[in-house]
Amino acid sequence: MGGYVYFFAQNRAEGSAKKRNLLGGKGANLAEMANLGVRIPPGFTISTEVCRYYTAKHEYPDDLEEQIKENLKKVEQATNRRFGSRQRPLLVSVRSGARISMPGMMDTVLNLGLNDASAEGLIQETNNLRFTYDAYRRLIQMFGSVVLGIPGEKFEELIEKKKEAKGVQNDIELTGEDLKELTDEFKELTEKEKGIEFPQDSSEQLRMAIDAVFASWNNKRAISYRKINKIPEHWGTAVNVQTMVFGNMGDSSGTGVGFTRDPATGEKELYGEYLINAQGEDVVAGIRTPQPFSTLKEKMPAIYAELVDITEKLERHYRDVQDFEFTIEKGILFMLQTRTGKRTAQAAIKIASDMVEDGLIDKKEALMRIDPAQLEQLLHRRIDPQAKLEVLASGLPASPGAATGVVAFTADRAVELVEQGKKVILVRTETSPEDIHGMAVAEGILTARGGRTSHAAVVARGMGKCCVAGCGAIKVNEKEKEFKVDGFMFKEGDFISLDGNTGRVIKGKISTLKPQLSAEFAELMKWADEIKTLGVRANADTPGDARLAREMGAEGVGLCRTEHMFFGEERLPYVQQMILAENKEERKKALEKLEPMQKDDFKGILKEMEGLPVIIRLLDPPLHEFLPNYEDLLVEVIELRMEKTDQKQLREKESLLEKIVALREINPMLGHRGCRLGITFPEVYNMQTRAVFEAVAELTAEKRSVEPEIMIPLVINEKELAILRKETVRIAEEVMKEKKVRFEYKIGTMIELPRAALCADKIAQQADFFSYGTNDLTQTTFGFSRDDAEAKFIPIYLEDKILTDNPFEILDQDGVGQLIEIGTQRGRKSNKNLEVGICGEHGGEPSSVKFCHRIGLDYVSCSPYRIPIARLAAAQAKLEEDMVQEEARGR
């Protein structure tokens, strides 16, 4: 052992599962299975170190070739075969294997070692012309596509022509002679396309295949997948060279893929599909629609029993659900791969809960098993049972949920339509790894071919996308951008709907309902709440939002944005009257109309959150946002001037235009807004605080426990806050005297400016709490206008690696995070009772939540549907902290 290459065979391996970072997931697990005594085809793994070396220097380490030769000899000895030999030729596969599974994103080449001479020897050995040329044509097809870059459809076209000429429907119906002819045609295509003959030197085949698989770490689909799943570029991939075993040697052979539990529901049952007389890519590529394991039990009972024994052993050993591949060669079962199985959020929670009950793992490990971001899948909508459905066809329910959208037939077109603001259903004969970018933006995926372990199904489940696969009733014509089903024709842009829970394909739009969360979900959240120390509140602007937030487990409202209440149809006219008022008295009259409406708003939210804190932010945005658009109004004025008809309306519009011009600002985000409005127009904030406190007084009189917290936004120093705090206290005392009740309340501020964070020690002397508005704090720290930045240059910054993440999605811990940490430390130094949290959408992003835990915040606040994510992330943050402390004590 040593160097760059690691050998494995049954009961004998130089690696183990602990060397995942070095050997990649596939190589590490092959070694682990070998050490467990599981029957696997012998082979060797070229480590991820080589990938990193190759990527950096565009060459291999000096002694790599010699190490490959040495390990190839070990494989020859283990199999009693010779690579490149005419007699008993050794054939191998070359596959990728990153430390985290990236299904279908990198390249594979099978049957390497076949050439004209070894093909003749294989025919003599097996007495099977069809098997030999099926393997040979597959090698040329894969080698041509993966290594030489010949478009795969050119080979498929030749296959279709051959089937048409022979009058057959399926590949399996082609004879040995047919496949021999096809092999020659593939050779001719290779020479025509690339100007070279298909290599007959097996060593050259192997070298070129290894090059191609390493290079595929940086292909377009792999890069896209890494970006979507936050997989570091520097990890690299290993390459596994493994003896071929063949599932296409007749009816005693076959191949399949499966899971030790249902990856969609989590049910404890062997789940998977297989094909008789086929190679592995036939199953995962969806070339033929596979059969469920229930029929394998009937057709090959001994093989099925052995498969159950092995997979149960693997699940017990790894203490997690396994996703496995196998081949049956002439009645002998070989395991080709095992890895931790990807699963839906619903399945992940049920599996974790069941494994705790079975004693395989404890509650803490169960919590760490769930990806917090994956919980969003649980919020998939379902079809309204009252909806009238016109079911067109049914396929396999490959990934749960319900989706409605316009049809797109290519991944590129799906992206274009989504950029136009449309919801899309991606419809394909079958998906391939090149479709990853279209699948990422689509609402749902529909394929005509493939099963529940096809590429479409696996990727859709990982992304939480609704998917119906293997719907043979639809006839897809991707060239003409249409599909036919049940007498209907659907073109690009037509609406269809999918039910990923049942496999139904439905005509037109449908109404959907929010999901109901399972008992296992509630149990998981209970475990999380028992462990986490960071509070989780909700951003809620209406009683309905507050009710939903409480259902989701919110411990209060961390942000109630009062400006959202002003846009109601019956309120906006009074808001505009207030803004357009010529003097203070006129402004007060308009505010008097708004006050009872505001009081009812606050009363409803406080009632829903009875017994929990509710932070109410006073008016924050610039006033012009409540007025008509300047450009639209200017067009109206010009048209009225030209018509010269309604002079009264013209004067009103001109007056309004003048006011809008007076209120316009060059940079309104940094202009007359937030506490600056409260100081220059105190009657606005006075109306809002009075409405809050009157609502509190009424609820207190009703013996309800309410905890209001008044938040004053956009302060730059303690003087602003002192002025507005004094006014707030005065109004609170007035209301308590008038209503003859006493109540508790807090007054704090939203820290949105770097200066406020740096001067937090002084500001904290006037505050009961800080809430960091991370959306605006990110803008002011970076100097980015969010809408402009995200539309114009952040994608380029991400592509060029100037930024690691979009800072509006994932908290910038090095910059914005440091301001939060500094502000918190300084604030608490001068006010030890200071309550501190964040209320931007970062409050529902897992890594940002964990950062908030690490720096000692009291709570995070996020939208209601992200509350479960924050609760789980907060629990994981505490568990990770505990693990670090335990390790430190151990040292």
Image: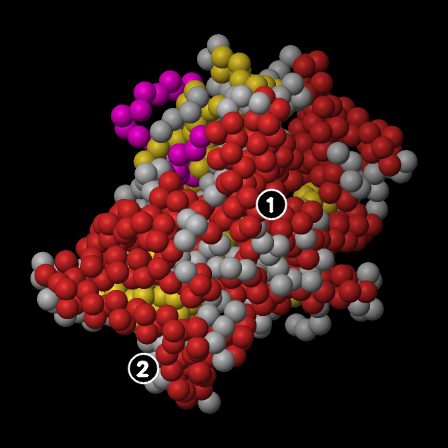
Start-end of magenta stretch: 379-404
Q: List x then y, in percent, for residue 21.
A: 59, 67
Q: List x then y, in percent, for residue 261.
A: 37, 48
Q: Residue at x 31, y 49 (%)?
A: 589
- How busy is the neighbourhood of tag 2: few (under 14 within 10 Å), some, or many (20 plus)? few
Mark 2 — residue?
833
Q: Amino acid at mark 1?
A: Gly
- How busy is the neighbourhood of tag 1: few (under 14 within 10 Å), some, or many (20 plus)? many
Q: Amino acid at mark 2?
A: Asn
For the residue pair 696 and 239, the one nearer the viewer reads as: 696
Q: Residue at x 40, y 80 (%)?
A: 764
Residue lying furthest right: 195
> Can the viewer see residue 622 in this picture?
yes
Q: Residue at x 72, y 58 (%)?
A: 800
Q: Nearer the viewer, mark 1 or mark 2?
A: 2
> Can the viewer see residue 527 in this picture?
no
Q: CA distance from mark 1 to mark 2?
A: 54 Å
Element type at mark 2: loop
Q: List x then y, in percent, for residue 154.
A: 75, 28
Element type at mark 1: loop
Residue lying furthest top: 487
Q: Which mark is residue 104?
A: 1
In-image side of 285 versus 110 (left or right) = left
Does residue 385 belong to the magenta stretch?
yes
For the residue pair 299 and 546, the one nearer the viewer reads as: 546
Query: Of label 1 and label 2, which has the lower sequence position?
Result: 1
In-image side of 639 versus 878 (left or right) = right
